[in-house]
Image (cartoon, coloured by chain):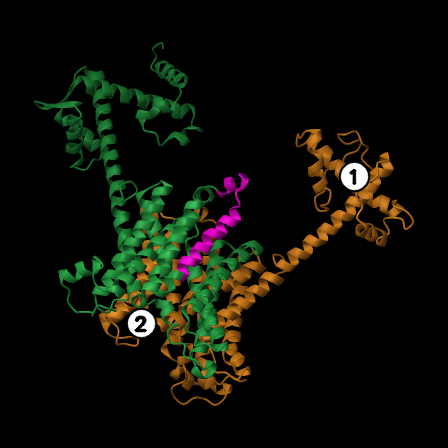
Chain colours: A orange, B green
């Protein structure tokens, strides 16, 4: 399958640009637990679009943009107002505002703007595919970097490009403030800039990005684009700057893969292309699932491997510790797991012919028991715990090689000698 | 629809519709919408209390792929794909799956609830849109998907008596489930940690609650559509929350307001031309909410504002009495406060011109002052009251100085309450400290 510039250049450009501006802003929404603001906004701008159309009678980009942005800001203000006046929980306040505004928008379309092409379903699904080339299309991708291309660019793509530019300016210039406000709004206010003004600035941008993306990609993709790239990046890193960069890569990658897939995948089955905005959403979901499974630190797989490894280490160390204590005072360990014994023999810690420590094993076990007894001494002497309460804690701490108890000699709180280092 | 949609309305028509005399089909729509509102309100209360209102949002959006997949499966099996039960089953399945996905994201990743809901909502709806665009090309499927669209916006007018009965059944089922599990759901909603410790199966209860949300959502699809059904689950409970703090009443109010919105909205839609019922029902819910927000007796804006204003007046009156007592009664041993002294006080405190007369009127009404030639006279009860306020004021100051670290927890108490907040021993000790400061023996 090949993409043709005539059909695919502008839709692809629109998708990538929308992905960029939404993806960038989404980072701050996800961190501030405002992920659903995009959802609310994308439903509640509908009456803004319709009213702007009813007042002006035209359906040009700037008019729609102003109407929808005003509706977006109204949403934020109303949500805040209801939260404050009625002490309504934030999620519920959002739900009340956007559903009522959406209902109002649908009613307005039905009653006043019925005979226009202002169709609620195109607002929902997006019409990426309709951004096709209208004039002479270049035959190959080489030809797209041409003055004629710029001249033929649809206004939606220009709007999106402008939005991306403004968003980048916002993020670069207010990076420090946004970062602080994202993690600690109270601290931000204490440091002398008004976090709630910043909140409104951010919301105006979210409204703007929502609206700019609307006509091109529809509201579903806006919701997904605002949240999923940032969420994906959040699974891969703890720091804000890498998170933003990863989210940008994810957003652009999903836009390209999803768009190509919307044409290519059905084609494999001999069918016609499917909705591109929806496909991009699915590509985003795929990347998120990959990150959730394979993420190096927080991924499901990495966590499972880490847990299994720790479990094995603990079992092995428990066996060594038991054998050491058996040598010390002649008490046989109560339960012996054959697999753990086999592993201990494989590592040369336990003798082949009987269940007893080798010299290597004894050294390893002594170090472990030393850690255990040092922790017990420490917990009694420094942390002030009772001698009969420290065993369980020491039992856990002894398996953590990174946490070393302070050195000491002599005996533990139960009178057992601490093995020398 | 039995009713021809006229461009103008007569009172008779309105009465006809509202009293179930406008024909069998209209009655079915009205009853069905009211039942839908009732069940959504009742179920929504627990979603709201568990801070899960927007899970309903995700469920609503997530029904779309289920509907389209059910259609595809039905067509593949040789049917027309228009069978309502099959489509609703698909909707319920994907709605339930979306809840599981939200829980999976919360369990296995470090993303928070808002992100989990947003992701599931966006992705499921995206999948639905992709599938819808696939089935909408006749050459792809070979059967017309006409009608699937109605699930997005709803088509209340198409409701038949059977649908209304289904809605009634769901409402009844939801209310029954709730009555049986009332204690458990209540405890889980208010304190899930305690419920867990007390041995309640919190996970199962949450599951039941969300299953009810899925059920109501699916029931509402045909009537109000998948985006607006969430409004019925959110708005009535939030509105009811403004009216009462008691859970049993909350459930009754939410159900009642939901039923009212459904009934009035459906009636308005039947009477007015070109009004999609789903939207009108939700807008009725919105109107109910606005009225509640303004007029609810305890938490409404008017009530709260009124209470604050009264409180301010009362406190201003106490300031006035205290000042009169300290500056006039104790210093000059008089009980008449000249009018110019009153004006000087008002200027000192920066009162707006209307506040002074209101405060004085209040004090006169309560019998603390009376009007005399050239000013106001403190009555014996006014003197006593002023003395008491002055003393409490001192006590409070003393307490704040001595116990600054505990005091912030008590700052909401007015001076009146000082003696009730502080122990008698502490009050005695503080009075001794005041006496020492004044140089007189205690």
The answer to whether residue B210 is magenta is yes
Q: Residue at x 55, y 68 (%)?
A: A286
Instruction: Tell me, yes or no, whether the highlighted magenta stretch contains residue B315.
Output: no
Vertical comparison of B295 with B436: above or below: below
Q: Residue furthest left?
A: B373
Q: Which residues are magenta?
A: B192-218
Q: Position of residue B181 (x, y in %)?
A: 45, 45
Q: Which residue is at the front of the view, B99 or B70? A: B70
Q: Nearer the viewer, mark 1 or mark 2?
A: 1
Question: Between residues A264 and B342, which one lies in front from this camera angle?
Answer: A264
Circle 1 residues within 10 Å: few <14, some 14–19, many ≥20: many
Counting the numbered discs, the total is: 2
For the stretch drawn in magenta, the main secondary structure is: helix
Query: Of label 1 and label 2, which has the lower sequence position?
Result: 2
Are the residues flagged by discs 1 and 2 from a single subunit? Answer: yes
Q: Looking at the image, which residue is at 32% across and 29% down?
A: B414
| Mark 1: secondary structure | helix
List x then y, in percent, for residue A287: 56, 67
Q: Looking at the rendering, which quadrant does residue A305 occupy?
A: bottom right
Q: Please tell me whether mark 2 sits on a helix, a strand or a loop.
A: helix
| Camera-nearest residue between A290 and B326 | A290
Host chain of mark 2: A
The answer to which quarter of the image holds residue B320 is: top left
Quarter of the picture containing the C terminus of chain B is top left
Tag 2 residue: A62
Left-right relation of B372 to A344: left
Pick the quarter of the image with the N terminus of chain B: bottom left
Would you say residue A195 is visible in this rendering?
no
Q: According to the image, label 1 marks what residue?
A: A370
Residue at 23 percent across and 59 percent down: it is B20
- The location of residue B312, given as percent across then percent down, is 25, 34
């Amino acid at each position: 399958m090949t993409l043709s510039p005539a059909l695919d250049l502008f839709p692809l450009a629109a998708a990538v640009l929308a992905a960029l501006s939404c993806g960038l802003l989404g980072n701050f929404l996800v961190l501030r637990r405002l992920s659903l603001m995009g959802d609310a906004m994308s439903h509640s701008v509908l009456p803004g679009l319709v009213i702007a159309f009813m007042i002006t009678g035209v359906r040009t980009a700037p008019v729609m943009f102003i109407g929808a942005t005003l509706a977006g800001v109204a949403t934020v203000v109303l949500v805040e107002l209801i939260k404050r006046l009625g002490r309504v929980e934030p999620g519920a306040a959002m739900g009340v505002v956007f559903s009522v505004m959406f209902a109002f928008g649908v009613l307005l379309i039905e009653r006043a703007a019925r005979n226009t092409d202002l169709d609620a379903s195109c607002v929902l699904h997006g019409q990426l595919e309709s951004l096709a080339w209208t004039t002479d299309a270049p035959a190959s991708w080489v030809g797209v970097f041409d003055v004629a291309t710029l001249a033929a660019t649809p206004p939606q793509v220009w709007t999106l490009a402008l939005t991306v530019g403004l968003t980048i300016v916002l993020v670069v210039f207010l990076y420090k403030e946004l970062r602080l406000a994202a993690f600690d709004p109270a601290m931000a206010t204490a440091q002398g800039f008004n976090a709630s003004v910043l909140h409104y600035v951010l919301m105006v941008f979210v409204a703007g990005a929502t609206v700019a993306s609307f006509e091109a990609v529809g509201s579903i993709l806006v919701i997904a684009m605002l949240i999923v790239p940032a969420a994906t990046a959040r699974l891969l890193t703890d720091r804000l700057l890498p998170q933003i960069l990863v989210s940008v890569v994810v957003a652009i990658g999903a836009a390209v893969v999803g768009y190509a897939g919307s044409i290519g995948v059905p084609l494999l089955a001999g069918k016609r292309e499917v909705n591109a905005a929806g496909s991009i959403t699915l590509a985003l979901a795929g990347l998120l699932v990959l990150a959730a499974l394979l993420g190096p630190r927080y991924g499901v797989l990495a966590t499972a491997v880490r847990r299994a490894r720790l479990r094995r280490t603990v079992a092995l160390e428990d066996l060594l510790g038991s054998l050491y204590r058996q040598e010390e005072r002649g008490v046989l360990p109560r339960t012996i797991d054959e697999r753990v014994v086999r592993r201990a023999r494989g590592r040369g810690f336990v003798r082949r012919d009987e269940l007893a420590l080798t010299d290597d094993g004894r050294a390893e076990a002594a170090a472990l028991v030393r850690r255990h007894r040092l922790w017990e001494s420490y917990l009694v002497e420094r942390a002030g715990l009772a001698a009969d309460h420290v065993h369980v804690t020491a039992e856990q701490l002894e398996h953590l090689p990174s946490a070393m108890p302070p050195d000491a000699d002599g005996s533990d709180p139960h009178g057992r000698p601490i093995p020398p280092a | 629809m039995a009713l021809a949609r006229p461009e103008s309305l007569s009172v008779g028509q309105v009465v006809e519709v509202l009293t179930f005399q406008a024909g069998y089909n209209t009655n079915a729509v009205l009853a069905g919408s009211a039942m839908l509102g009732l069940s959504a309100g009742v179920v929504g209360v627990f979603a709201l209390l568990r801070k899960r209102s927007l899970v309903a949002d995700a469920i609503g959006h997530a029904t779309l792929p289920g509907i389209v997949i059910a259609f595809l499966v039905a067509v593949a099996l040789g049917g027309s794909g228009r069978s309502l039960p099959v489509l609703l089953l698909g909707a319920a399945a994907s709605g339930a799956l979306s809840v599981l996905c939200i829980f999976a994201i919360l369990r296995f990743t470090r993303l928070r609830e808002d992100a989990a809901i947003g992701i599931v909502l966006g992705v499921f709806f995206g999948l639905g849109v992709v599938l819808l665009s696939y089935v909408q090309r006749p050459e792809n499927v070979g059967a017309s998907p006409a009608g699937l669209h109605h699930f997005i916006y709803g088509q209340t007018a198409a409701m038949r008596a059977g649908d209304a009965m289904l809605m009634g059944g769901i409402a009844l089922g939801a209310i029954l489930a709730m009555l049986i599990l009332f204690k458990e759901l209540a405890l889980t909603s208010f304190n899930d940690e305690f419920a867990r410790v007390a041995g309640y199966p919190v996970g199962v209860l949450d599951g039941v609650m969300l299953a009810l949300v899925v059920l109501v959502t699916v029931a509402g699809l045909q009537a109000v559509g998948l985006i607006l059904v969430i409004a019925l689950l959110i708005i009535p409970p939030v509105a009811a929350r403004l009216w009462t703090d008691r859970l049993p009443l909350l459930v009754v109010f939410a159900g009642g307001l939901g039923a009212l919105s459904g009934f009035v909205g459906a009636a308005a839609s039947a009477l007015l031309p070109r009004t999609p019922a789903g939207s009108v029902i939700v807008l009725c819910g919105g109107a109910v909410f606005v009225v509640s927000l303004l007029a609810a007796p305890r938490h409404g804006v008017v009530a709260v504002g009124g209470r604050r204003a009264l409180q301010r007046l009362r406190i201003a009156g106490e300031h006035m009495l205290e000042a009169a007592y300290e500056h006039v009664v104790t210093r000059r041993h008089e009980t008449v406060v000249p009018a110019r002294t009153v004006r000087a006080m008002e200027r000192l405190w920066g009162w707006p011109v209307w506040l002074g007369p209101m405060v004085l009127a209040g004090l006169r009404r309560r019998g603390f002052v009376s009007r005399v030639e050239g000013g106001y006279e403190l009555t014996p009860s006014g003197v006593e009251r002023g003395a008491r306020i002055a003393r409490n004021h001192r006590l409070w100051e003393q307490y704040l100085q001595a116990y600054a670290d505990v005091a912030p927890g008590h700052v909401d108490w007015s001076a009146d309450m000082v003696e009730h907040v502080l122990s008698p021993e502490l009050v005695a000790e503080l009075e001794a400290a005041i006496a020492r400061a004044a140089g007189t023996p205690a």
